[in-house]
Image (cartoon, rainbow, N blue to C red):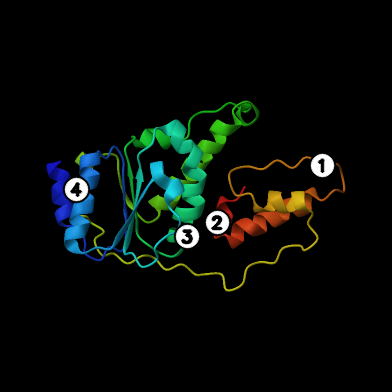
């Protein structure tokens, strides 16, 4: 706790980068909230357990604290919404995000799956793909610490400016003759998609439009398989 308190004493009044912290206790999270209030940092606190009650992101806030306070099995049910409706918009808007998890970091990391797992354990594979996506986004902006005891003092990225993103001025166009099922496959960004259809039915067109959709969403081309 002393190491965490020391770290917080050096936390910048105008944070430009966030912090990813695992094994965070409720007391430490409350201490972080109190420090932000004392410093006058305008913060929106979003908990995974009450995510359904979060209607919108407050764009006027300086900092966003995402508290993962659920058991892993319950978090799997809301992870997609957290990523797609909270983390993605904040990340692309260059808003600093703090992600505090009650669980250890190892809970979110990819497990070893057999080649048949995509058929036999599809939900588990999808969950870990979502977790990987979430942590990769956070790692690009945040310091990451496995526990409060490992925090440095002071933070070595205090007030460091974020690297600029080059927004795409115009999105790549989609084919306008996709049928409803093809559009659904195109819009799916949660993990893998399998297209089963006979020859000449538009499989290649569907996958091409899916890649275009991922690029328009800001996914780096080298991460698309």
Mark 3, residue position: 89
At numbered mark 1, what does the secondary structure look like: helix, strand or loop? loop
Labels 4 & 1 near each other (Cβ < 8 A):
no
Q: Earlier in the sequence, mark 1 or mark 2?
A: 1
3 vs 220, left or right, is left
> Which is more foreground, mark 1 or mark 2?
1
What number is the disc on residue 219?
2
> Which is more foreground, mark 4 or mark 1?
4
Q: Earlier in the sequence, mark 4 or mark 2?
A: 4
Q: Earlier in the sequence, mark 2 or mark 3?
A: 3
Q: Which residue is painted at 45% across and 34% down in the image?
A: 74
Q: Position of residue 112 (x, y in %)?
A: 51, 28
38 vs 88, left or right, is left
Distance, label 1 to label 2, CA atoms, is 27 Å
> Which is more foreground, mark 2 or mark 3?
3
Q: Is residue 203 visible?
A: yes
Q: Is residue 151 visible?
A: no
Q: Earlier in the sequence, mark 3 or mark 4?
A: 4
At numbered mark 3, what does the secondary structure look like: helix, strand or loop? helix
Residue 89 vs 75, above or below: the answer is below
Q: Position of residue 85 (x, y in %)?
A: 49, 54
Mark 1, residue position: 197
Q: Which residue is painted at 24% across and 61% down in the image?
A: 158
Label 1 neighbourhood size at 10 Å, few (<14), some (14-19), many (20+)? few
Label 3 neighbourhood size at 10 Å, few (<14), some (14-19), many (20+)? few
Label 2 neighbourhood size at 10 Å, few (<14), some (14-19), many (20+)? some
Distance, label 1 to label 3, CA atoms, is 34 Å
Residue that extends furthest to the front in the rendered view of this protein: 53
Q: Which residue is painted at 59% across and 43% down in the image?
A: 191
Q: Position of residue 42 (x, y in %)?
A: 28, 63
Q: Quadrant of residue 214?
A: bottom right
């Amino acid at each position: 706790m002393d190491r965490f308190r020391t770290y917080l004493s050096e936390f910048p009044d105008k944070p430009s980068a966030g912090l990813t912290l695992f094994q965070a206790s409720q007391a430490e999270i409350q201490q972080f909230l109190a420090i932000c209030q004392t410093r006058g940092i305008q913060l929106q606190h979003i908990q995974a357990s009450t995510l359904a009650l979060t209607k919108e992101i407050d764009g006027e806030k300086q900092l966003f604290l995402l508290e993962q306070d659920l058991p892993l099995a319950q978090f799997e049910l809301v992870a997609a919404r957290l990523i797609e409706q909270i983390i993605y918009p904040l990340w692309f808007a260059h808003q600093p995000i703090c992600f505090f998890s009650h669980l250890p970091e190892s809970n979110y990391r990819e497990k070893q799956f057999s080649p048949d797992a995509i058929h036999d354990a599809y939900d588990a594979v999808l969950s870990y793909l979502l977790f990987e996506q979430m942590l990769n986004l956070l790692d690009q902006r945040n310091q990451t610490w496995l526990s409060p005891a490992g925090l440095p003092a002071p933070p070595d990225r205090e007030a460091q400016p974020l690297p600029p993103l080059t927004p795409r001025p115009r999105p790549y166009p989609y084919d306008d003759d996709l049928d409803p099922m093809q559009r659904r496959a195109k819009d799916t960004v949660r993990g893998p998609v399998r297209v089963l259809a006979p020859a000449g039915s538009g499989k290649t067109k569907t996958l091409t439009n899916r890649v275009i959709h991922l690029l328009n969403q800001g996914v780096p081309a080298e991460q698309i398989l």
